[in-house]
Image (cartoon, rainbow, N blue to C red):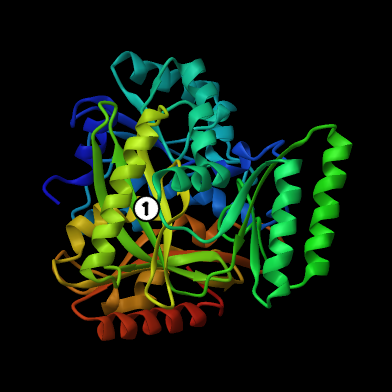
Amino acid sequence: MTAQFIPRLKTAVAGEEDARFVFLGNFEVEDVWGEGEPGLPRMAFGSGSAVVNRMDEFAMLLAGPGDRVLLKAAPDPDYLAFLEGLGVALPEIHTVAAQNPQQTVSQDVLDDPELLRLVAEWAEQGAYLSVHGVSVLEEEIARRAGIRIAASSAEICKAVNSKVYSRRVADELGLRQPAGRGCRTLTEWSAAVTWAKEILASGRRVVVKDAYGVSGKGIVVVDDPRRLDQMDRMVSRKARTTGSERVGLVVEEFVAKRADLNYQMTVGRDGDVRFDFVKEAITESGVHKGHRIPARLDGRQEAEIREAARLLGERLHADGYVGVAGVDAMVGDDEQLFPVTEINARNNMSTYQLPLQERFVPEGWVALARQYPLRLPEPLPFKRLDRALGEVLLKRAGEEGVLVNNFATVNAAAGGDGGFDGRLYALVIAPTEDRVRELDEHVAGVVAGLTERTGS
């Protein structure tokens, strides 16, 4: 890459690489986009939402000197010291007055008049608001603080993020995708069900996707016609209840795959499309678990990905979209590339890894972006994790090691009776894939051992 990602992003959406940004990591913005949408039944997150909402700390690593970041709570001071010891230049950190673990950071900011007043001051100084994804909540922050959003409108972002949109645009651009149907009306859904039954009758499977599902939620693999009939009744009953023919569903033939991919491009206000990266996504049951860097692609496959990014970026700009766009893709078990399975009109997990990747992953090395689940009896301070990981914790650029890139999610669900679940996010960096695997297994073992009393 000829220029670092953040200056490229600022130039693309604000016109100057040294623009001042206020970063906000409003993860799970799809929940807001999906409100009232006629897709599949939505399940509550339960205690998991507290962990997801603390993914807001990722935004801290996109920002730099002169920028600001809004967080639900202050980071662990020892974690900040770890980052500073690596030479990471941190932004000015501001936290909400009172965070609700079950609310996103955007909702907490809207509940904090004093913080909104500060944002308004920064807006007068020329700052932009840069968010994970734009919904009506972030537009309300912008309206109340008088700050410009460094992205498209919520209406455009929501439209682009729909899987029905992805399906239609890929068809129009001639990009290979699994056989299927995008359904915007009950009539289109009924036709898709009839088509899917033919697929099932031949012994193959289909996948039904909610237009605004994310990370394994709102995706159902169907291999039984009775299950499809059950879903058909559910969708039809919902339509009768609401009195609307509108639906938001995609039905596709199931494709056996070797790898999931995620790539990103940045669409500038002037129409310039910059390819940022392609990574191999690690998923379990459709749920994102991390990335392998670099993706295992041959030259033909990577060239096809880059061309798809160019075509999609140009189309997105024509539809009024600017900013970061991530695309999910896959490689079939026959090595055939499907360059678009869905478009994400927001930052991706990969987005937050990129500045660290540029600085800490030497050319030709391998990195694994991972999340490690924890079950803890009490809060775990970063200094205890530091001691537990010992020498494998990254010490400086150019060396192998483990770089923790979000610590807030470890203790986010603490506070109730008994134990709680958390996640540790980290980049595992080494010269070879074998060494990355060894380090990954070591970290997993350390994390498993932390289920004992954590101490202080």
| 112 left or right of 71 in image | right
| 90 left or right of 137 in image | left
**Res 82 seen here:** no
Pointer 1 residue? 77
Q: Is residue 152 above or below residue 196?
A: above
Quadrant assignment, res 272: top left
Q: Label 1's element?
A: helix
Seen at 25% across and 56% down, the residue is 356
In percent of width and height, residue 405 lies at 36, 59
Considering every residue shown, the one lying at the far left of the view is 2
| 48 left or right of 363 in image | right
| Total marks placed | 1
In percent of width and height, residue 193 lies at 74, 56
In percent of width and height, residue 222 lies at 70, 68
Q: Is residue 446 above or below residue 193?
A: below
**Res 264 seen here:** yes
Seen at 16% across and 64% down, the residue is 397
Residue type at mark 1 is Pro
Number of other residues with Cα within 10 Å of mark 1, as a class: few under 14, some 14 to 19, many 20 or more: few
In percent of width and height, residue 422 lies at 55, 64
Seen at 35% across and 77% down, the residue is 389
Q: Is residue 328 above or below residue 39?
A: below
Q: Is residue 317 above or below residue 222?
A: above
